[in-house]
Image: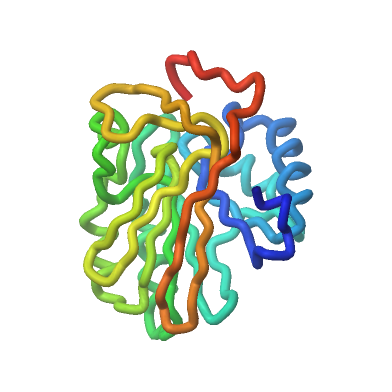
Amino acid sequence: LVSQRPAAYDLVLATGDLVHDASAAGYARLTAELAALGAPVYCLPGNHDERTAMARHLSGQTVRSVRQVDAGGWRILLLDSTVPGEDGGRLAATELQFLAAALAGEARPTLVCLHHQPVPVGSAWIDTMALENAGAFFDIIDAHPQVRGILWGHVHQDFDTRRGPVRLMAAPSTCVQFAPESEQFRVDDRPPGCRLLTLLPDGEIHTEVRRLANSPIGLDMASAGY
């Protein structure tokens, strides 16, 4: 979807679970694929990534693992919510400190990105693997009214709601989708997609989900997990 109209996008945010096996070969292939999009790509780790390997391999000019991006009058913060060996997430004290410091004294509207959902999305099984210390996270968010949006991956489904003035959004997966509002793990038959964001100067966010017309041939829809 992005590669079809690269000039239409200022940047791409990749919100984790970028390489399933965290291998050097996997990150090399990922870098080649993302570099071909024609726009800068900023990445954060998911529970299937290995943060050290990811930071080492995604360090080029086009595809990078970064903490902060200032673009178009907005500040974009990318947090690491991963816990080694765990599917669920937690923001370490250093991540919370980084978030508070990056927001302190900042007037620009801000989008905060992480991998794990900080609120339940309505699928009981994946909500057991959410952000463990969401309370501490929202304590910082609530103290900084310039935060206008929070974006995450992990749940492999569309989610879009508000918490006061803050837009809460999940991006669908670029691979297999998870069925929404499901008590147990269940694959959705909708094709891969992405979330488009328009970050306006006044702090408003316009967003929509776009999907491929069909799922790619060879995508394993029968796997017991992803």
The x, y position of residue 24, in whole percent, is 71, 33
| Image point (41%, 78%), residue name | 203
| Rendered position, 139 above or below 201 | above
Q: Nearer the viewer, residue 166 or 212?
A: 212
Q: Quadrant of residue 106?
A: bottom left
Task: Using the image as rendered, state which of residue 135 and residue 76 is in the foreground.
Answer: 76
Instruction: Give the answer, above or below, for where 36 lies relative to 107.
Output: above
Numbered disc total: 0
Position of residue 3 measured from the top left corner of the image (x, y, whole percent) = 72, 50
Give me the residue at 34% from left, 22% from top: 185
Is residue 128 in sight in this rendering? yes
Could you say where residue 177 lies in the image, as x and y percent from the top left? 46, 32
- Residue 36 picture location, percent across and down: 78, 49
Relative to 161, say whether 33 is above or below.
above
**Residue 47 vertical placement versus 91 (above, below):** above
What residue appears at the point 73 percent right and 51 percent down from the top-left corner?
Answer: 4
Residue 50 appears anywhere in the view: no
Left-right relation of 37 to 46: right
Residue ranking furthest to the front: 213
Viewed as shown, does residue 97 lie left or right of 211? left
Residue 172 relative to residue 131: left or right: right
| Colouring used for the render | rainbow
Give me the residue at 43% from left, 69% from top. Answer: 205
